[in-house]
Image (tube, coloured by chain):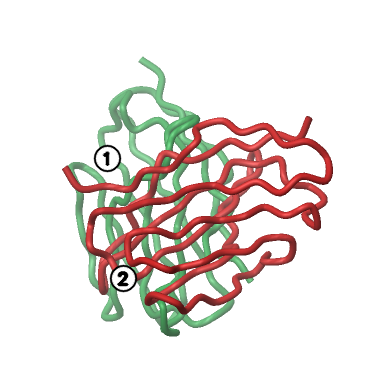
Chain colours: A green, B red
Amino acid sequence: QQPVQSPQAVILREGEDAVINCSSSKALYSVHWYRQKHGEAPVFLMILLKGGEQKGHEKISASFNEKKQQSSLYLTASQLSYSGTYFCGRYGGTSYGKLTFGQGTILTVHP
Amino acid sequence: DGGITQSPKYLFRKEGQNVTLSCEQNLNHDAMYWYRQDPGQGLRLIYYSQIVNDFQKGDIAEGYSVSREKKESFPLTVTSAQKNPTAFYLCASRRDRGGYTFGSGTRLTVV
């Protein structure tokens, strides 16, 4: 079963902040976050492991709460380049490292 | 530079035809994956492989086949048994405990 992302879409002005949530009904061993521009391949942003750690990439950070089986992606002072679709990927701890992806959140940043 | 190469970029398939999508990586990654992406949807796992001559079915393997004869190569065949093959196909590889690196994708259309 795929993780559920919310919201489905976000529209921002440059400089505004956003939060994207990823919730799983199955156990989370780790969470990946990716950004995909229209017509392109997804690009890896970060991975969060068990332990509730928070990681960052530029002005993008994320948290992981394994008890609640949730992860959140925080985009601060958004830039035009942040526009795209964001996917979380759930890794359940099985072999082969296969991910189950959420349905995606479309982020649009306007000038 | 290391990366994943998918070819062709665009592919047109006639009804009843088998077509093969190429995926080559020079990252020395062991694990490789095939995902399918439909418009406005997330990525769904077709097949994955951890080592040469070994591969596993993903969530939507019906109508697809793969081979892993070399570490660098993981081609996907879309058979005539796949009734709705029109989609964007993404190949990915992963180093141990790292994020996915995706290829640029193949857009398959049935004509």
Left or right of B51 on screen, residue B28: left
Disc on res. A76: 1
Q: Residue furthest top?
A: A111
Query: Picture coordinates of residue B53 (x, y %)?
Result: 45, 77
The reply to whether label 1 and label 2 mark residues of one chain is no
On screen, A110 above or below B88?
above
Left or right of A66 on screen, residue A22: right
SS at circle 2? loop
On screen, B56 above or below A23?
below
Amino acid type, mark 2? Asp
Q: Nearer the viewer, residue B50 or B52?
A: B52
* Pair 1/2: label in front: 2
Q: Quadrant of residue B88?
A: top right
Left or right of A104 on screen, residue B108: right
Amino acid type, mark 1? Thr
Q: Residue furthest front?
A: B69
Mark 1 falls within which chain?
A: A
SS at circle 1? loop
Query: Picture coordinates of residue A108 (x, y %)?
Result: 46, 28
Q: Nearer the viewer, residue A53 or B75?
A: B75
Within-10-Å neighbours for mark 2: few <14, some 14–19, many 20+ = some
Mark 2 falls within which chain?
A: B
On screen, A25 above or below B15?
below
Query: Picture coordinates of residue B58 (x, y %)?
Result: 60, 70
Q: Quadrant of residue A76?
A: top left
Residue highlighted by disc 2:
B30
Residue at 55% x, 58% y is A102
